Image (spheres, rainbow, N blue to C red):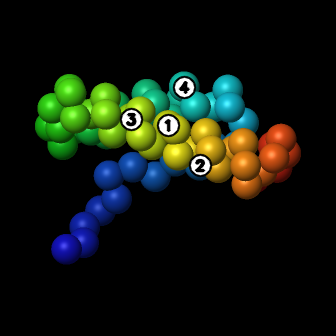
Amino acid sequence: MSGPALLRLELPARAEQLGELRVALRDAFARVQVSPEASERLVLAINEAVCNVIRHAYAGRDDG
């Protein structure tokens, strides 16, 4: 099953950008009527995954 992307977002690999990511995710989930509880669980999981990428894959570099 394919269709238009729910969200396309490019941010610098910096922890201070995570707030913008969380806002964009919540907005996207609201547009497709994800329940608030599920939305918050998804936002938390995605935030943690992206935080790990920033911390471990970029190891303090912000050029990604």
The alpha-carbon separation of the residues under discs 1 and 4 comes to 9 Å
Choose mark 1 or mark 2, whichever is in front.
1
Q: Amino acid at mark 4?
A: Gly
Residue visible at 32% across and 52% down? 6
Q: CA distance from mark 3 to mark 4?
A: 11 Å
Left or right, 47 with reference to 29: right
Name the kind of residue labelled 3 in the image. Val
Residue 39 x %, y %: 27, 33
Find residue 44 and report its image quarter.
top left
Measured Cα–Cα span from mark 1 to mark 2: 14 Å
Q: Is label 1 in a helix, a strand or a loop? A: helix
Q: Which numbered disc, 1 or 2, marks the residue that appears first in the sequence?
A: 2
Q: In which quarter of the view is residue 33 placed?
A: top left
Q: Nearer the viewer, residue 40 or 7?
A: 40
Task: List the residue tagged with mark 4.
Answer: 19
Q: Report helix, strand or loop for mark 3.
A: helix
* Left or right: 61 in relation to 33: right
